[in-house]
Image: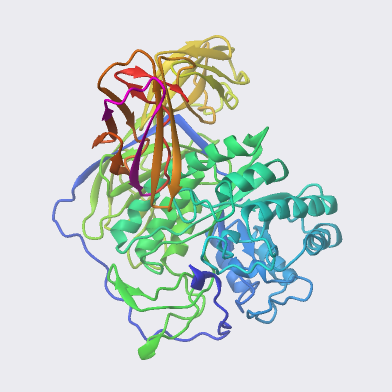
Amino acid sequence: MTARRLRWAAWPVIAVLAAAVWGMGATAGAATAPAATVTVNAKAGLATMPDTGIGINHAVWDSQLGTDEVADLFGAAGVRTMRYPGGSYGDIYHWKDNTAPGGYVAPNTDFDTFMGGVRRAGAQPIIIANYGTGTPEEAADWVRYANVTKGYGVKYWEIGNELYGNGHYGANWEADNHADKSPAAYANGVVAYADAMKAADPGVKIGAVLTTPGNWPDGLVGSGDTATWNQTVLSIAGPHIDFVILHWYPSGSTAAEALAKPEQVNDMMFAAREQISRYAGANSGRIGIAMTETNTPVGMDTQPGALFAADTYSSLLENGVFTIDWWDTHNGGAKLSTVAGYPDYGDSGILSSATCLEGGVCEPALNTPFAPYYGLKMLSTFARPGDQFVRAGADDPLVGAHAVRRANGDLAVLLLNKDPDQARAVTLDYAGYTPSAAAPQVFTFTNGATSISSATTGTSTSQTLPPYSLTTLVLHTAASSASAGPGTPGQPGATATDRTATITWAPAAPGGHPIAKYEVYRQVGTTSEQWGETTGTSLDVGNLVPGSRYTINVLARDTAGNVSWASPPLTFTTGAPAASSCTVRMTDVTDWASGFVGGIHVTATGVVGDWTLTFSWPTARQRLTGGWNGTWAQNGTTVTVSSSAAPASGVDVGFTADYGGPNILPTAFSLNGVVCAAG
């Protein structure tokens, strides 16, 4: 983690020819490709692609920062956000004199040079204000210079970088000169920075550093603290910030493990938003989420990196993250290996630094794009600002699928074949969308390729995916007019109990015909389950399951039968009943970011003799490992604890559990089949 952010060497400014020979890619290992079915459901709307979605990190140690060649490469790849001055350098960098005491700053990497590259690429910046060794006044002066003096219009400003790595939790890689390194001190510092910076320009957006759910030190309570980093920072700084900052470097020792990690994103974002909602105060829904660093643990320079980048960015964007910024532009090779049949240098830069490793093996020529670059370029081909992501999925775990609906009625589908050896014969099914009979435009990036190919081939319902490939289909609608239908209903909201919910939304604008009714659908995987319909703008639903997560969309239908696009999604969770013959309170007593000690306090009336408490883990990545004060067992995701201790005056039981990814605690418990109230 540290090496990715603290690379202090100057990068060469002349190209060095690679000594390694790029090998032959893997070929299909069977005459008949295994079959897979992909379902695209246009009724199941997700987030809208923002104009800041595809981002990259840049750094002052990089001699190529701001150069025309790099800016043009990023512009061609659709990069629309560029982060500066580079990871942990953000907490040692002083913008006025372009210095980073203790680090290396390459010539011609000052802020104005950076902004020249940003503008040439057609991007916008996201800036790290120096919290670790800086002051609110220094940051405010930077805002004033950028937006008042120079008119750059820099909107997004982070307050420091990974400050939870300042030693407070035992690991010390982030510079922090403050005597108090607690989350409370950082949160109060964020408030001071936000006040000073918004006084210089009220239009700036301020971001605070959080820990990523399921990743160290998420869940830990430091010495002298009363709560976790996220709870503390959100509780204090929440009313003063506009977005939060997450970083994600998933673990994995094989490409297959790395390519399975994006499956965690839905739960990760749900957990992050749940924390924001719980702790950040009133109107917390305005707070955005930025993933300003990520990279793959395997295949940084080869095809697994391209697959990981496209899959991770798409998954995060579907969940409403407004920018994802790859780490990083140039970083330098670390270790030569062969991944997917090609040389991998362990270089987390997206462009070659032309550095040489032990044994005289060198990277390709300077600024040669590595495979993840094409992963981002494919993403910009697939999803454009303003497109709405819609639910897509496959029945094969080695096939990934994402889809967007465009304003002109087109549908684009991004398909990933994560099998390094075999092609996939894919059948595509569509719900809520009828593609035209014309052959689609198909973009493909294959293992070892140095460009994205384009052809008009196959059909909208049948495609063959090469091994280890990215494929985008662009489909046209069979409808005669894509604009005749009603407008999109507004963002839904919900008020939920344990078994009921009232869903409300803003009305849609009528199109060529009056609106006849609204239909409410629940997303169940790639299927839309209709909950009801109404001529009004609210719907009461019942028979819900306590402690369960639901995602819904609203669609408008007019008197001619035309149907709108799906509304933005709403995800809500039912809770426990307000009253019951039993109450249960679960607490995360001690957490170490991969497991925890849980405590459960049970109180019940009218229970004599043996009793059994039942709950279900919210994710399949949580596992009971032991327990006390009762007999514990787990079957699937269901956990039971049995005891004969009289619960009338309260009984405490405890357990240990492991988890991989976000640790979302259950909120519904049943005692002898009776759903309990929250204690």
Residue reaching furthest to the bottom:
360
Residue 123 lies, with reference to residue 439, above or below; the image says: below
Image coords of residue 109 (percent x, y): 68, 75
Tell me, yes or no, whether the highlighted magenta stretch contains residue 658.
yes
Image coords of residue 47 (percent x, y): 53, 38
Q: Which residues are magenta?
A: 642-660
From the viewer's perspective, tell me whether residue 470 is left or right of residue 205.
Answer: left
Task: Write the residue at 36% across / 23% down.
Answer: 647
Image coords of residue 298 (percent x, y): 36, 65
Q: Quadrant of residue 618?
A: top left
Residue 151 lies, with reference to residue 458, above or below; the image says: below
Residue 216 lies, with reference to residue 93, above or below; the image says: above
Please state the total of marks drawn on the protein image.
0
Residue 77 lies, with reference to residue 662, above or below; the image says: below
Whether residue 472 can be seen here: no
Residue reaching furthest to the left:
31
Which of these two is toward me, 522 or 388? 522
Image coords of residue 467 (percent x, y): 26, 57
